[in-house]
Amino acid sequence: MTLLLRNRLTDWNPQLFRELKGRLKTRNVALAVTVSLLGQLLVLFYFWSQLPVQGSSYSNYCLKDNNYDCIQDALGNVAINWAAWWLDLFRVLGLGSFLILLIGGVYTLTADLAEEQRRGTLNFIRLSPQSSQSILTGKILGVPALLYLVFALSVPLQWWACLAAGVPVQAILGGYAFSGAVCFFFYSAALLYVFLGGAQAWIAALVAWSCGWPFIMMAGAIVAETTEKYFDWNKQSGLALLFGFVLINVGLWTYGICQALNRRFCNPSATVISKKQSYFAVALFQLSMLVIALPSLAYNPSKNTLFEQLYVVAILNLCWFLGMIAAMSPDRQALLDWARYKEANSQNTGVKRKSFLGGSSSVMRDLIWGEKSPMPVAIAIQLAIAAAMWVPWILLWPQNEGKLQAFLGVIAGVNLLLIYAALAQLILLIKARKPAIWAAGAVGAAIFLPLVVLLQLSATPEKAPVLWLFSILPWVALEHASATSVFLTFIAQWGILGLLSAVLTRKLQRAGESASKALLAGKPSGA
């Protein structure tokens, strides 16, 4: 029976069998069993110590009268609220297990894959006939196997506590489904972090800890709001909508991360996301934020409230588009290959060189859809998608006051992000040992250096609004700047963007020319 199961597992997913074989040693399994059972006993002893004793006048786990005193019988025995006791016991067990799975799984997966890359064994795995999905699934299911065992041993006590507390079965299953989806999302993100060059498992675990708390709280709410004690149809309906919305988003983002994982696993030099995928991704991200922001308009919010929401959206979009710039930037060799191909195609078709990046249909198609072409045009399309979704939201504001300022802020934000994209792509074309670090440093300096200088000079938005329009916080200066100043600032920003684009175009054209000449001469290019 064991041999048959082993053969079936090997045939279904050899990578999973490899991981389980290396981890499910007798010593490791015994340690996991001991930790799980001991942890459950400690939790039980703790909660047992919290039960009210004879003569207690107050306790969290006693039935209370109208004066909130514990109800006692004639002998002084306290009436215990066992449903509340079991519910709190499950919360600690369930949420504690979720936290262990989330943090521990992210840490072990990151450490394991980083070690595989360091030792070079991941390249051998790539040569195997297994599909990338099979290998990555085997990693996710196999690497945290001992953590799964610790969790599985706590499930019987969790179910006992849930049923004793009166939690509906569907709520228990929903909580498990939600926790599993969130863990799979973070596990996939941890693998992608390693493929992008990350190797510090503690950083990945710290990020999972920081970003996982909202999901942990939501998992607890799923159970708490569906018990008989807290039964409320209105609350349950709102919770179900929120749960469904979050679960759908988690599923979609997990799918996107898995696509990126497959791309990087099969081709380590490929961009994380294709340009076609990026357009769908940005639309989904903006739609998710818009769904959260739209209901607030029904409550006739004030101008300050609307601008606070707009600030949050702007900050989230700044982080999002900086991430997209990093995810879509082809490396230097890919850019050189693309430039050489376009130069050769230009010579073969007789197109003038000045139109190398000047707008021919084939070049424009490459800039919009191509895998190896520069990414600023794709970033511009993404920004147009985002603006097309948020401008109607601004138009729906109940008050007309502030709409113009919001529109100008959107334009300023778009200008700055396009400048960052062009700057990053230009730096990535430079011949350097680690161009990605140089690009990140250049963009980081463009973002934070103006703020540091302005703060050091005590130049407030009221005193120097024009200077603040060149920072990542143009919103704070718009209400203090004149229309002429704003217009001239936009002209200057477009001039900077045009200059960076011209330099990038020229460097790509020269790179294509030198690469083509070197290829014809049989020499390596040194562009």
Image (cartoon, rainbow, N blue to C red):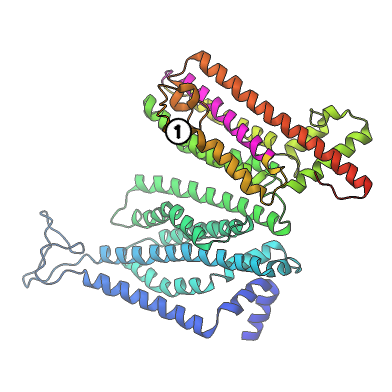
Q: Position of residue 66 (x, y in %)?
A: 11, 54
In this rendering, does residue 1 appear at all? no
Residue under circle 1?
Answer: 311
At 31% from the left edge and 75% from the top edge, which residue is drawn?
42
Which image quadrant for residue 477? top left
Q: Is residue 366 left or right of residue 420?
A: right
Q: State the extent of the magenta-drawn residues as a range.
A: 399-426
At 61% from the left edge and 53% from the top edge, which residue is drawn?
257
Residue that lies at the very extreme toward the top in this rendered image: 484
Instruction: Return the residue nearer the eye: 251 or 357.
Output: 357
Q: Is residue 98 above or below residue 299?
A: below
| Crowd band around label 1 with a 10 angstrom C-alpha radius: few (<14), some (14–19), many (20+) | some
Residue that lies at the very extreme toward the left in this rendered image: 74
Q: Position of residue 519 (x, y in %)?
A: 90, 47
Q: Is residue 369 above or below residue 454?
A: below
Which image quadrant for residue 381? top right
Magenta includes 356?
no
Instruction: Return the residue nearer the eye: 61 or 449.
Output: 449
Q: Is residue 484 left or right of residue 2?
A: left
Q: Is residue 160 above or below residue 415?
A: below
Kind of residue at disc 1:
Tyr
Instruction: Return the residue nearer the eye: 14 or 483.
Output: 483
Magenta includes 417?
yes
**Mark 1, secondary structure of its residue:** helix
Q: Is residue 348 left or right of residue 446?
A: right
Q: Main secondary structure of the magenta part?
A: helix
